[in-house]
Image: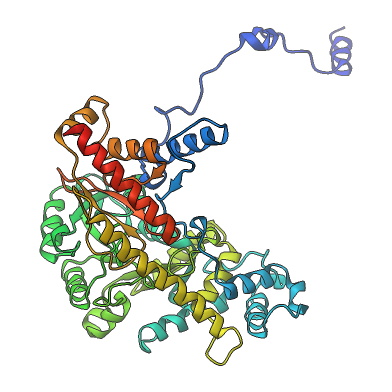
Amino acid sequence: MRLRSALRDLFRGPRRCSSSAAEAPAARRSRDRILTLQSMNPQVRAVEYAVRGAIVLKAGEIERELQQGIKKPFSEVIKANIGDAHAMGQQPITFLRQVVALCTYPDLLDSPRFPPDAKDRARRILQSCGGQSLGSYSASQGVSCIREDVARYIERRDGGIPADPDNIYLTTGASDGIASILKILVSGEGTARTGVMIPIPQYPLYSAAISELNAVQVNYYLDEEHCWALDVSELRKALYRAKEYSNPKVLCIINPGNPTGQVQSRRCIEEVIHFAWEEGLFLLADEVYQDNVYSEDCQFHSFKKVLHEMGPEYSGTVELASFHSTSKGYMGECGYRGGYMEVLNLHPDIQAQLVKMLSVRLCPPVSGQAAMDVVVNPPKPDEESHQQFIQEKEAVLSSLAHKAQLTEELFNQVPGIQCNPLQGAMYAFPRIFIPPSAVEKAEELQTAPDMFYCMRLLEETGICVVPGSGFGQRDGTYHFRMTILPPVEKLRRLLQSVKDFHVRFLDEFS
């Protein structure tokens, strides 16, 4: 009888679940969210990135209101918060776009509209791609022929100092390379946690990456009174203070500076390298603005070149990672996310670990790698596209130099605004006077005084800039960062609007 009952149950199939949870209507069932602000990764929660922070969210909200026909005292939002050249109207470099277009759609290689030198570049890149297609993965370190071109570019830039393609890593913009190097450098707990020395003011990528990795941010202050100069005595003070609560082993340099625009002298770079050698620090040289030097008294010197010229005691021992990008310079190709880093004096075992880590993300965008190739391998003097390329490049850089001078001059005509010379990069970081009553008002609103100022500027003029507190500044000083990328006439109107606003702001709170 039991056997017959068991067989009957077998052929009937599984019984329906009779639990109360299964029978309860969906509306009556509930569960707590797994991911909340309290349960999420606290390192991610600690990350801040002022360049795309609250002020930019408000700018987007105002833009939508304008589109809906809501009346404002201005007709457009000018997003001067970020160095996005093409979004500000800068025209692409023709040769770069031609080569990337040919790589993307090789059928165009038969078109007479493209010059032979652009076709030669595209064919060379495609021959190094799997299936001769930009849509294939590359090696994790990047397409081999592009790394070779980067190495040759560095050699030309640095006067013949050798560069090894095996030390070149193509990256998703410079940011990816910086984050990758920091990731393998950070270790330890408590007072043994890795300390990362960064300039103040800084580009907030650094503070964000340090927070995400749970490292220790070690601030060293640039000297605003001397055109944001880097003083090694300040480095030393910051280092020794940090040793009390961390293990400082990384020193980050941004040259030319972002947001401050200073260009370091060769002597300063020598002093920094000696300091890193003496204190056992790994050097990170952010050199993405190396083409953006405007002051006649300044010249870009790469850390790699100066390191080599200081002799084998330094060049054979100091660990250095330097970074470049397609996003800045005269190219402004932010959206392609092309970049590279050169890493020197890395132990072979660590180099293998770095390649392993990079392989996890497979490869940087191959279209961005192709764009990077044009930056490091532009048309030669005997090639068809050379003259147009040089004309376009010089037009962009001369325009930026003019706008840098214009911005400095006009800001310094405004009572309560002081702007250092814009020697390089593509930003102004003026110091602004905020009256005590405005500081008190900001405190009432539980916001930073310069955020209060910048939010008022946005709401009254439509101009979006980033408060200096997002980059770091000395206590009691206030700044904002503004790009100089808008076309000259729009930049003039922008600067005039800032002037008029600042005068009204002082009148209101004085």
Establish if 293 lies above or below 407: below
Q: Quadrant of residue 110?
A: bottom right
| Residue 243 appears in view | yes
Q: How is the image coloured?
A: rainbow
Question: How many numbered markers are drawn?
Answer: 0
Q: Nearer the viewer, residue 441 or 232?
A: 441
Residue 283 x, y percent position in the rendering = 28, 67
507 lies left or right of 108: left
User: Which residue is painted at 32% across and 72% down in the image?
Assistant: 294
Q: Quadrant of residue 354?
A: bottom left
User: Which residue is painted at 46% across and 34% down in the image?
Assistant: 72
495 lies left or right of 325: left
Residue 392 x, y percent position in the rendering = 51, 75
Task: For the N terminus, give its image quadrant.
Answer: top right
Residue 263 x, y percent position in the rendering = 26, 69
Q: Nearer the viewer, residue 491 or 158?
A: 491
Establish if 99 lies above or below 77: below
Establish if 200 lies above or below 99: above
Q: Nearer the viewer, residue 137 or 200?
A: 200
Task: For the C terminus, give its image quadrant.
Answer: top left
Q: Quadrant of residue 67?
A: top right
Residue 55 x, y percent position in the rendering = 39, 39
| Residue 377 appears in view | no
